[in-house]
Amino acid sequence: MNGLRVRGPFHPDWANEIPYVMLIDREGLGHTPDSVSSLPSSTTRMLDEVDTILIVDNAQQPMQAAPVAAMRQIAAAGYGEKLVLCFSHFELVHGPNLPDINARRQHVIASVDQVLSAIGNELGYPTERLLRQRLDRNLYLLSRLHSGLDRPDDADTLGELRWLLGQLRVEAEPLDLGDSRPLYSRGRLAAVVDDSIAAYLRYWELRLGVGTDPTVRPAHWSKVKALCVRYARRSNDEYESMRPAGDLLAALTDGMRVFLAEPLRWTNGTPDEDTEQQIHDALTRKVTADLRRMVNDRLFLDAAELWAEARDVTGAASAQQRADLVFRKILEPLVGPSGSAMGDSPDLPTAVVATVVERAGELDISID
């Protein structure tokens, strides 16, 4: 069992009416500062289905790698307008330099600002600007959620919860993309896809211990084997923080975001920043669904026999042999530019470019 559905009505004492909302609580994204580069595939598949994406983090500590990766991937995939950020345990934020609630609030917001600046450096200023605008009105600081919220100093939390509930029920306005469209270079797109895949392969070369770099710690051999077992059985496309398919999708969507931020020109003049962002998001959402299917087919469904071969390696030095096999016989050939054919395309990078061009055409966006 991987889910449990519970039906109400549930009516918290602080709500003025029964809140007619459906909440889908996903598994935790991790609570350590270890490197986390992507969301679980089971989570990314739901991004298009929900109205709001609510990330809950702990206000006591700086934002960890997992929620930061979630924010980055949500924005890169074109779902930044759905993002809501909540911090719990706000009552435990204290220190000699935080004399009042406003200082404590600014302390938490400053940590978010650092994350947004880092995302902007990776994905470009338009994405950072979108997230800042979104979180200016959708960031909530909550205290004492484990209690009955019946003390006088709980008024701020009650106000935040009521405002949050109201925001969850606001329907999104229909998009107006205007009459101007961006023009892009197909050669530039191909280069961005190649760079994204090269970075992905280098990361996994180091993650598997096939290559060496002091900044990346190789995964333990038992985790590599557990990953192979899950892929071979087609039961799951990840093991803990090891997500070959999720990392590839994240690398491609990150590259797409950088590519879209740099059009050659616009057909009818540069639109305002909000419209420009909506056009980028509309195309990214279309492309992300296709990329998720392509990555899933390539690494998960079609490669089960190869993963089984890696799983079954035994004998002396089997750990290193398994890691080499995963990288040399699965990831490099199936993902790289010199790999096997995928549909009508000679390899995965070419298939990605063709998909982006096709989806862009549906929005009257030219990539020549």
Image (cartoon, rainbow, N blue to C red):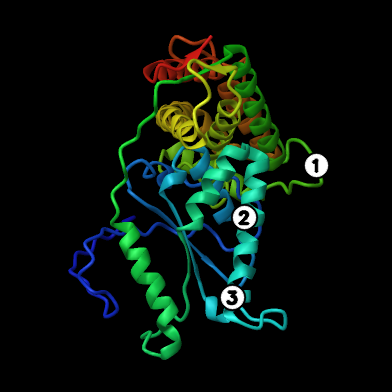
Instruction: Report if residue 68 is visible in the image.
Output: yes
Q: What residue sits right under mark 1 in the picture? A: 213
What is the distance, in whole Å, between disc 2 and disc 1 at their CAs? 20 Å
Which of the labelled discs sits on residue 16, or is there none?
none
Give percent across and percent down for residue 28. 47, 60
Camera-nearest label, 1 or 3: 3
Mark 2 vs mark 3: which is more N-terminal? Answer: 2
Residues at circles 2 and 3 in contact by the CB criterion of under 8 Å: no
Residue furthest to the right in view is 214
**Quarter where residue 30 is shown:** bottom right
Mark 1 vs mark 3: which is more N-terminal? Answer: 3
Residues at circles 1 and 3 in contact by the CB criterion of under 8 Å: no
Q: Residues within 10 Å of mark 2 (few under 14, many from 20)?
A: some
Residues at circles 2 and 1 in contact by the CB criterion of under 8 Å: no
Q: Which is more toward the observer, 282 or 190?
A: 282
Q: Name the element at disc 3.
A: helix
The amino acid beneath tag 3 is Asn
Q: What residue sits right under mark 3 in the picture? A: 102
Mark 2 vs mark 1: which is more N-terminal? Answer: 2
Give percent across and percent down for residue 74. 49, 44
Q: Name the element at disc 2.
A: helix
Q: Name the element at disc 1.
A: loop
Viewport quadrant of the N terminus: bottom left
Q: Residues within 10 Å of mark 3 (few under 14, many from 20)?
A: few
**Quarter where residue 66 is shown:** bottom right
Q: What residue sits right under mark 2 in the picture? A: 65
Give percent across and percent down for residue 289. 40, 31
With 52 as the anchor, is 120 left or right in this view? right
